[in-house]
Image (cartoon, rainbow, N blue to C red):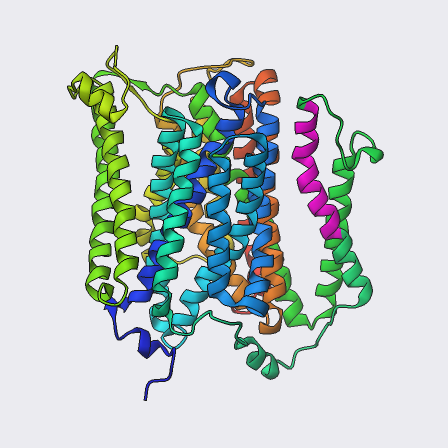
Amino acid sequence: MIKENSTDQFFKSTVLGHPSGLFVLFFTEMWERFSFYGMRSLLVLFFMASIAEGGWGWDQGTASSLFGSYVGLVYLSTMLGGYFADKIIGYRWAVVIGALLMTLGHFSMAFETQFTIYLGLVLLVFGNGFFKPNMTSIVSEMYKDRPEKKDGAYTIFYMGVNAGAFFGILLCGYLGEKVGWGYGFGLAGIFMFLGLVQFWLSQNIFGDIGLKPVKKDVEELAKKDTDKRVPFTSWQLGVIAVSVILGLLWIINAPASKISKLSGGSFDVFGFLGEKGNSIAILTALVLFIILLVYRIMQYSKTTREKLIAVTFFAFITIFFWAIFEQSPNSLTVFAEKYTNRILTGNSSAIFLVVNSLMTLIPLIIINWVMFMLFRKTFAKYSIANIVLSFSFVIIWIIALWMLAKDYYMAGYLDLSDSTLQFLKIEKSTEALTEVPATWFSTLNSLFIITLAPLFSKVWESKLNPNANVKYGIGMIFLGLGMVAVAFGANGIAPGAQSASVSMIWLILVFLFHTMGELCISPVGLSYVSKLVPARMIAFMFGVWYLAVAIGMKGAGMFGEEVEAIANEKGISYFFWMLAIISFVLAAFSILMSPIIKKLMHGVR
């Protein structure tokens, strides 16, 4: 007799050797990432665009500050969403609530008023918190009796993540830049809504998984764990509370005080501490948290203590990795918009159009084939869900073909009558040229991940697989090389220059190197947390890890805040050289620490 919700049950109906339910999650996650990355790619550009261009006319410092706080809070909110799912509502309701909040958030932003943009960002923060950690939890539960299939499942799942990011940036970015900001924000909302509907109508495919909180295997493992316990005392909980309150007030106040100054206000929560009040607040929070972390680590047995020190080391490097890597939708997109030659004519235009067409159509065809395979297995039981999914792709095809037709027409390679132009809402062209959207470059990250991930996976499974420190070191070297590429390309831009015509090749190289760095670091971190940390402490240390990522995301915004001042004084190239040097120093530090950290890890690889 088959146990309910056992892996055997799910493997009765398979697509490409995996349960059909995995592909329901694949498409739900794909639409969520489509909406998240699509909107995010436009955010800084929207804030910095002039009032005449439909934006808010902010300086880059203010735009970067709000961007950094937004993405930082997105990662912090995963702790809240994970807690509610584990203790109160279950994974499935958490996903539904998260998707609904994000749908409302994107639609709210489409109205482009101050109130609706801020409301949208708040809804997106909480929506991501409920959605993001619980999709992977459903995948994990589905494969708990088939661990040998789990790596393949996550590979397929993350292909959905990257496919969604690719098409979101490509299409939302195009509509936002070329048609209107609200269209880009609204398109993100449409696909989040369709993803929600598809998930809701297909949910019976998951059996009882995620319907209510379940006691995880952690409790069973904890019983076998005879290591010394270090329960939280009242003073430690007090320190955590003070650190959390100061940290949250800081991450909100940092952009709020800058925005207030733009409108002639003087709002500043920490104004009573003087001009450096914000810095004093966050440094106090960090010092308190570090003291608590060090104190608690020192209370454990020698082996556990050393493993926790190793995790903390990787978390430290991770902060800087994300702070530099996440310049993609921030300073690198602004660099593409202001300083990169994106106007192509002649052969350059033709080559770009062909490459962009292949980049758009080939992934779409492959994903539609996967969708057809899913239809064959699930249409009888979940016909409405499959119709919603196919309707989603009809919209994608219409927008993608419209985008390509518009680009070929604007470049002079396609003749369209006045009536056709009017029907397609395309303005009449007066000059044959191609203008590459500034957001287009960010699509390269997802494209390179899909292309290079199998190669890196093969290397990690071979004898060439380096230890964790060397992986981190190699990742930071690639990160630095990316910044060297754009710094070298920007060398000729004079301090204070507001525009330039740097070749596109430098930004393409940035995203190639940064993707290679991401493939060295991103998959490794959480894996080592789960391997090094005792089962009873997993939740707390995952919290510490996501805190490190959140600090890195906010750090990306803080780096972005300094771009204009540095560019005006020393040139934009200087800013990228600084980030390159930081990357190389941390790479050397990680590799040099390899023997020490290897000893602290006690044989864990």
Residue 154 versus residue 387: which sits nearer the camera?
387
The answer to whether residue 252 is magenta is yes
Q: Quadrant of the N terminus?
A: bottom left
| Image coords of residue 23 (percent x, y) | 31, 60
| Image coords of residue 28 (percent x, y) | 37, 55
Please report the bounds of the magenta region as a residue range. Answer: 243-261
- Tell me if residue 155 can be seen: no
Compared to residue 159, the image places residue 462 above or below, namely below
Q: Is residue 276 left or right of residue 312?
A: right
Residue 544 versus residue 476: which sits nearer the camera?
544
| Image coords of residue 458 (percent x, y) | 32, 57
Task: Give the image quarter of residue 514.
Answer: top left
Q: Is residue 299 left or right of residue 222?
A: right
Tally of marks? 0
Name the residue rendered at 64%, 71% in the picture. Answer: 303
Q: Main secondary structure of the magenta part?
A: helix
The answer to whether residue 596 is magenta is no
| Image coords of residue 278 (percent x, y) | 75, 36
- Tell me if residue 240 can be seen: yes
Compared to residue 371, the image places residue 576 above or below, namely above
Name the residue rendered at 67%, 41% in the picture. Answer: 251
Task: Give the image quarter of residue 485.
Answer: top left
Name the residue rendered at 53%, 27% in the picture. Answer: 47
Q: Residue furthest bottom?
A: 1
Residue 547 versus residue 521: which sits nearer the camera?
547
Name the residue rendered at 50%, 57% in the picture. Answer: 97
